[in-house]
Amino acid sequence: MSGGVAGARDGRLTIMVSGAPGDVAAARPLLEILGSTIFVVGDRPGQGQCVKVINNLMSACSILITAEAASLGTKAGLDPRTLLEVVAASSGSNTAAAQKFPQQVLTRTFHQGFALKLMAKDVRLCLDEARRRQVPMLLGSAVEQLWNLGEASFPPDADFMEIVQMVERWSDATIAPGSAGAGGGG
C-alpha cells in the first residue's frame, strides 16, 4: 500500500497486490474499501511487496535529491517556493518537489505521517531484494546509507520528512520562504 495515514483514513490508498486471479478477485471488494487505486502486479507471493519497496526507494531518493537541490538553490539566492514550482512543472518533477516540500518543508512542519524508521526499513528491504537478485544499485545503495544515517540521527518517532533537516544542516541552508541566500550564497 501507498498513500500514508491520510490515504488510509480517506480510503484513497494505492494498493499493490499479487496472487492467483481467483484469490485477488475474492479480495477485491475489501481492497476497494481501503484503496481507490488497485494494481494487480503479478501472481506470485511477494510481488506486491517488491513493488511497494521499489516505490518507496524512489520516493526516498526523491526526498533526498530535492533536499540537496533546494539547499543549493537557497544558497544561490533562489526563492525555494519558486524553485519547487519550476521543478514541479518541469522535467525534474517528483512528488517531493510538487507536494511534500511545499506542504511539510516550506511550512517547517516536517510531518507527512510516515515514520523515518519505516522508510529506512523499506529502503533496506528494497536493497536486500536487489542484492538477492544480483541487481547492482549504486544510487540505491547511497540512498540506503543516507536513510540509515538519518534513522540513527533522529528519535525513533521522527517523521520521514525530518531527514530534510539533516541535509539542511550539512548545507548550512534553510529551505523556507524568505531564506534565499541564507547560510552563504553566491
Image (cartoon, rainbow, N blue to C red):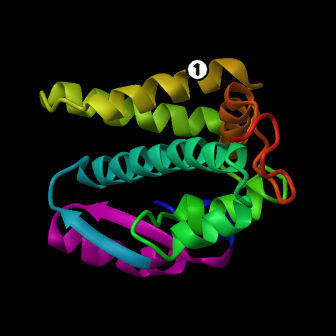
> Quarter of the image holding residue 167?
top right
89 sits to left or right of 7: left
For label 1, the crowd category at 10 Å Cα-Cα, with few meaning under 14, some 14 to 19 and many 20 or more, is some
Return the x and y of residue 10 as percentages of the image width and height: 66, 77
Task: Identify the secondary structure beneath mark 1.
Answer: helix
Question: Could you say which is closer to the camera, residue 158 or residue 5?
Answer: 158
Residue at image mark 1: 149
Return the x and y of residue 130 as percentages of the image width and height: 22, 32
Residue at coordinates 62% horizontally, 26% vertically from top-left? Answer: 150
Q: How many marks?
A: 1
Query: Which three-letter amino acid code belongs to the residue tagged 1?
Result: Leu
Residue 23 forms part of the magenta stretch: yes
Residue at coordinates 64% horizontally, 37% vertically from top-left? Answer: 116
Residue at coordinates 36% horizontally, 78% vertically from top-left? Answer: 28
Q: Which stretch is magenta? A: 10-36
Q: Please, is residue 59 above or below residue 32 in the view?
A: above
Question: Could you say which is closer to the camera, residue 117 or residue 84?
Answer: 84
Residue 87 forms part of the magenta stretch: no
> Quarter of the image holding residue 133?
top left
